[in-house]
Image (spheres, helix red, strand yellow):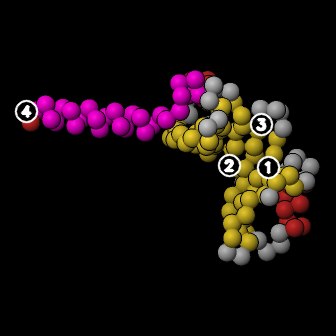
Amino acid sequence: MQKVLLIALAFIFVSATCFAQSKAPKAVVAAFNEKFPNATKVKWDKENDKEYEAEFEWQGASYSANFGTKGNWIETEKTVAFASLPLKVQESYNNSNKGSKVKAAAKIDSSDGTVKYEVEFKKGLKTVEVMYDEGGKVVKM
């Protein structure tokens, strides 16, 4: 009887572990694997009823990518150094956020072909994220 109980517990543990590693639908995981072959440290989250997000490492960098429930790619966000952002984005940030310390920066490629840049910084006790277009114009705060 104990053997059966141990086997059942082991099965439950393994099943729960597998489920936790891939919460995304098969079509989403397949599209992800095709777009980002050999990605590592993949963690899935359900953003909302229409979108899943994977956080992962790929080609030596940290990324997140969003996919629709049918596997359609929406956008990819790559963590980058602030100094690697386009000069106009850096200037726009520096002109409007003097004294603020940059916490993180990212390049965002979208399925519609647009490229945006995100800068996360501390403003007082608050963390703020600002999105810029390629010309340095603020598109979202």
Q: Nearer the viewer, mark 1 or mark 2?
A: 1
Give the residue number, with chain letter if any, for mark 3: 110
* Residue ID at (83%, 33%): 113
- The quadrant in which residue 75 appears is top right
- The quadrant in which residue 129 appears is bottom right
Q: Which of marks 2 and 3 is in front?
A: 3
* Residue ID at (66%, 31%): 68
Q: What residue type is labelled 3?
A: Ser
Q: How crowded is mark 3: few (under 14 residues within 10 Å), some or many (20 or more)?
A: some
Separation of marks 1 and 2 at Cα, in angstroms:
10 Å
Q: Considering depth in this image, is 60 or 73 the residue closer to the camera?
A: 73
Separation of marks 2 and 3 at Cα, in angstroms:
15 Å
Q: Which amino acid does label 2 sit on?
A: Thr
Separation of marks 1 and 3 at Cα, in angstroms:
11 Å
Q: Considering depth in this image, is 114 or 61 the residue closer to the camera?
A: 114
Q: Position of residue 82 (x, y in %)?
A: 76, 56
